[in-house]
Amino acid sequence: MSALDDEIRDLLRFAAERAILPRYRNLADHHVIEKAKDDLVTVADHETEEFLTEALTRLAPGVPVVGEEAAHADASVLERLGGPCWIIDPLDGTHNFAHGSPPFGIIVALADGGETVAGWIYDPLSGRFCHAAKGKGAFVDGEQVTARTTGETPPVAAISLLFMAPARREQVKEHIAPHYRLVDIPRCAAEQYPRLALGQNDVSIFERTLPWDHAAGVLFLNEAGGKAARNDGSPYRVDGHARPGLIGAASPALWDELAARMEAL
């Protein structure tokens, strides 16, 4: 791993040990707030983001930070996404965490000009550390990985319907789902992208494409040799977060197959 990878891993591990793991299955009612319908935030989210924002600012002075909770409090934070910036999801899978269930993780990405140039995904429970840098491959705990399919027929699909409009949801259920073996979504991008790269799932559909959820995972999957892109094949950009629709797949062929089916809806 590079010196930067080591530094980020240590920061994420420390943040998890300090703010997340002590509160796992140990949250008081007043430690959980509903930001919007079915969208929770906990004291662990806030403390982790505050710590990482301070640490990353020390690590790279002058590079602004876009944190999920900071952006929720002040939408102008999103204007930083067009230039060099850190992107933080302090606790991806908050819904699971708040209900005392795995999976959940911490995601950090480094972007420039709307493109992710490096990404890190940490699983506090297992210690798994996924990382990737543009043009340099994808790694798990320092070992380079190559995306692999499940080898199943039909392919295994984790399809998120949570943020789809009702009509779109019904179209996907009727015309897409029958071609795959459906599995439950983890409600956690920090888990879903590794599943696509490591032979557990073949394809995924995401409707909401916020940068803190997807910036690191898209890079990780693409660098592993899978494919993550907009439904029309265009690259995912962190400054295009308002645009819906993203497909991830363990191989370009599986991506093409699913994209063609989505295009026909």
Image (cartoon, rainbow, N blue to C red):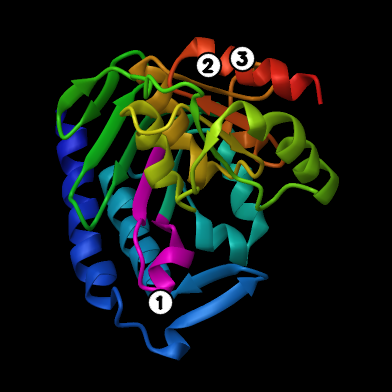
Q: Residue 243: percent from the left, percent from the top?
A: 72, 36
Residue 254 is marked as 2
Tell us which disc is closer to us: 2 or 1: 2
Quarter of the figure that contains the N terminus: top left
Q: What's the CA distance linking mark 1 and mark 3?
A: 42 Å
Asked if residue 195 is among those painted magenta in the image, a careful observer would answer no
Could one spot residue 239 in this view of the protein?
yes
**Residue drawn at 36 percent across, 27 percent down:** 197
Does the residue at mark 2 contact the one at mark 3 (Cβ under 8 Å)? yes
Of residues 80 and 18, the one nearer the viewer is 18
Q: From which residue to which does the magenta span run?
A: 90-110
Tell me which numbered mark, 2 or 1, is placed earlier along the sequence. 1
Which amino acid lies under the numbered mark 2 shown in the image of this protein? Leu
Q: Residue 169: percent from the left, percent from the top?
A: 75, 44
Asked if residue 92 is among those painted magenta in the image, a careful observer would answer yes
Element type at mark 3: helix
Element type at mark 1: helix
